Image (cartoon, helix red, strand yellow):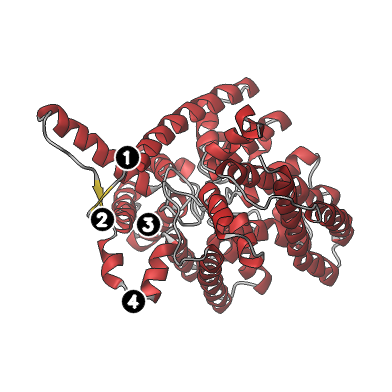
Amino acid sequence: MNKRKIISIIGKIILIEAALMVPALLLALYYGDGDAPAFVCTIIPAIIIGLLFSSVKQSDKRMSSRDGYFIVAAAWIIISLIGALPLYLAGGFPSYWNALFEIVSGFTTTGASVLAEPAQLGHGVLFWRSFTHWIGGMGVLVFVLMVTPMENDNSMHLVRAEVPGPTAGKLVPRMRTTSMILYGIYTVMTLVLIILLIGGKMPVFDSFCIAFGTAGTGGFAVSSAGIAGYHSAYIEIVLGIFMLLFGVNFNVYHLLLLRKVKDVVKSEEVKVYFGIVLFATVAITVNTFDRLTGIGTTIRNAFFQVSSIMTTSGFATVDFEVWPEFSKHTLVLLMIIGACAGSTGGGFKVSRVIILFKAFLAEIRHIITPKAVITVRVDGKPVDKETLNSTKIYAAAYLILVCMFTWLISLDGKDMTTNLTAVLACFNNIGPGLALVGPMANYSVYSDWAQVLLSVAMLTGRLEIFPMFLLFAKSTHDR
């Protein structure tokens, strides 16, 4: 393991995090809420540590695949530990562990909160809390690759370890250029959303915070009323559409920029993704239709919640805890499926669902005709054995870990529905669950140790399991 290279890169990441806190510090000074000292006391030590780490001399600049996985897992833990400090020092959280849970939820774009009244926080803390959604949505290391020159082979190891989905590829030959393209698309879409929200008469500060949560498919709100507090059908529709757009593989937008529309139309993942959204919206609309509220409101509520849960954004406009069981079960299934690979959304990913479903059908055909050569194909192309095997292994690991996290958190004494949906919501980076952690509740019902466990679940789910395990594997640390 190239320890000097790892320390140097982590130092750069710490410096970048310190720089990213500056806008929150400036807002804290502007509004004068008293949370500016919390940022100063975090930024200055972070700069010192970052400079010390990044100045470590490297005799060997090469990076192996295991180094890449180690850096990604370690970086996400470190930025969370540092990022939680302003929240705790500002006095908005009773313990550091509460603040850590909140900031891990931010960076992993989960949106699970321990706060009943977010509006009691200062503007600087509120901004930083939402801004972490935007930072974590596209990926911390992808951002680092955009602003820091790095050997292309080394950068590819980082992307493979961080980008969500069964595969990670380059849009163009150089990974730094790829990172710039991705963040360029991401930034433009975010700015368009901010303009539309301001046009819908949402306050400017709120528009930025909500747009960050939508772009990163996070879900932090700036008040206890959430999106419903704006009382605007226009805002709900705009957010519902943009949540879906940010849940699409960003490679699709690059193809559209290149005018390769046929390739986009052929994408099975995109078609299945929007097909599931349409089916779930219609099913929940029928199941929850209330003549008193009208068909238009029912469709809008169903569409917004399907969009929010499918993309793992976690915003809520209604208390779906009181919906019929069929609708609640549908939302839980959407939690598991999640968004597209290569998007800012979490979950199991639509592409994996497609691959596993086709692998299942292929196995059935193989049983019927043992001598036939059967190939699993996606978008007309054969899926290689490595991708097929890794998808199966991921599915097995996913199931085992959800069971393990649910079993361990049951020690906190909550009911099974609360525990299971809390784990699913955190592992899939969604936010609200059901029962005690429903859309109108929060995660303060859990003890500090349970919140730390759920924080581990959020990080494990966001990094898609393997980097977190490789971080502590003995073979990773061997030379």
**Residue tagged by mark 1?**
385
> Label 2 crowding class (10 Å Cα cut-off): few <14, some 14-19, many 20+?
few
- Give 372 or 304, whichever is nearer the viewer: 372
Distance Cα–Cα, label 2 vs label 3: 35 Å
Q: Which residue is mark 4?
A: 259
Do the residues bearing badges 2 and 4 touch, measured as CB atoms within 8 Å? no
**Along the line of sight, which residue is nearer the eye, 229 or 360?**
360
The disc at residue 444 is none
**Amino acid at pointer 3:** Thr
Q: Is residue 366 left or right of residue 191?
A: left
Q: Residue, x 61% and y 69% (percent of image)?
A: 207
- Identified by mark 1, the residue type is Lys
Q: Which residue sits at x=50%, y=30%?
A: 402
Label pair 3/1, CB-CB below 8 angstroms: no
Q: In the rendered image, which residue does mark 3 sit on?
A: 298
Q: Which residue is mark 2?
A: 379
Q: Position of residue 40 (x, y in %)?
A: 88, 59
